[in-house]
Image: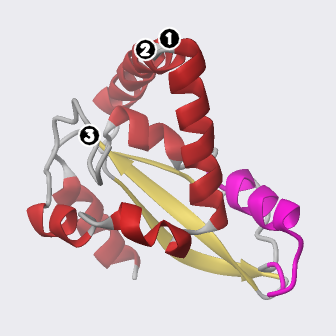
């Protein structure tokens, strides 16, 4: 879209929409990983007319129900922020393929909550070989305060 998603039932920050209103005129400033995501999205829209978007939306309902069920028994779920051990940032002269690989290898644990809408927060909880380890807290819908309280207690 033009800086906003459709069918989202959560908060729309109007100042953020205003800040991103002219993104098309500054597309060269977008990260390579975002540009590739946008190209892929455009490709699928043109060739499959929303079929896979609709399928993903249907699957996200099942995913949300699964997390909702797990959160019936617990106030919070805890999991690693990354599904892998942190890797060093690619050097400034790294090939584009490495930059894209690093960007997408990190989202497996965080992306599901973009789809389900569950509030989630990552906290630094340690280091391994000098690189950070993240602890992700996930709460029930509309229970952001629970995450904030737990994060404050953890710190």
Compute the Cα span from label 2 to label 1: 5 Å
* Label 3 vs label 1, nearer the camera: 1
Q: How many marks?
A: 3
Image-based side of 142 in relation to 117, left or right: left
According to the picture, the residue beneath numbered tag 3 turns out to be 140
Q: Position of residue 107 (x, y in %)?
A: 62, 51
Q: Position of residue 117 (x, y in %)?
A: 31, 39
Q: Position of residue 38 (x, y in %)?
A: 54, 46
Compute the Cα span from label 3 to label 1: 29 Å
Question: Which quarter of the picture shows residue 46?
Answer: top right
Q: Is residue 42 above or below residue 107?
A: above
Work out which quarter of the rendered image holds the C terminus and state it: bottom left
| Mark 3 secondary-structure assignment | loop
Question: Which quarter of the picture shows residue 77?
Answer: top left
Q: Is residue 9 above or below residue 147?
A: above
- Observer-nearest residue: 71 or 89? 89
- Residue drawn at 37 percent across, 17 percent down: 61
Residue 152 in sight: yes
Dot placed on the residue nearer the N-terminal end, 3 or 1: 1
- Observer-nearest residue: 114 or 27? 27
Question: Which quarter of the picture shows residue 147?
Answer: bottom left
Image: magenta residue range: 90-107
Q: Could you classify mark 2 by the number of other residues whose Cα lies within 10 Å: few (under 14), some (14-19), or many (20 or more)?
A: few
According to the picture, the residue beneath numbered tag 2 turns out to be 54
- Observer-nearest residue: 117 or 151? 117
Q: Are marks 2 and 1 in contact (CB under 8 Å)?
A: yes
According to the picture, the residue beneath numbered tag 1 turns out to be 51
Dot placed on the residue nearer the N-terminal end, 3 or 2: 2
| Mark 2 secondary-structure assignment | helix
């Amino acid at each position: 879209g033009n800086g906003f998603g459709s069918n989202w039932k959560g908060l729309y920050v109007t100042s953020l929409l205003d800040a991103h209103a002219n993104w098309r005129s500054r597309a060269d400033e977008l990260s390579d990983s975002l540009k590739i995501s946008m190209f892929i999205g455009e490709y699928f829209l043109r060739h499959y007319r929303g079929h896979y978007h609709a399928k993903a939306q249907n699957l996200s309902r099942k995913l949300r129900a699964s997390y909702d069920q797990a959160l019936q028994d617990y106030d919070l779920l805890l999991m690693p922020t990354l599904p892998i051990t942190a890797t060093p940032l690619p050097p400034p002269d790294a090939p584009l393929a490495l930059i894209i690989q690093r960007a997408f290898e990190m989202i497996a644990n965080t992306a599901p909550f973009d789809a389900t809408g569950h509030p989630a927060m990552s906290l630094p909880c340690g280091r391994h070989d000098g690189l950070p380890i993240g602890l992700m807290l996930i709460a029930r819908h509309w229970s952001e305060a629970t995450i904030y309280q737990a994060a404050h207690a953890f710190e």
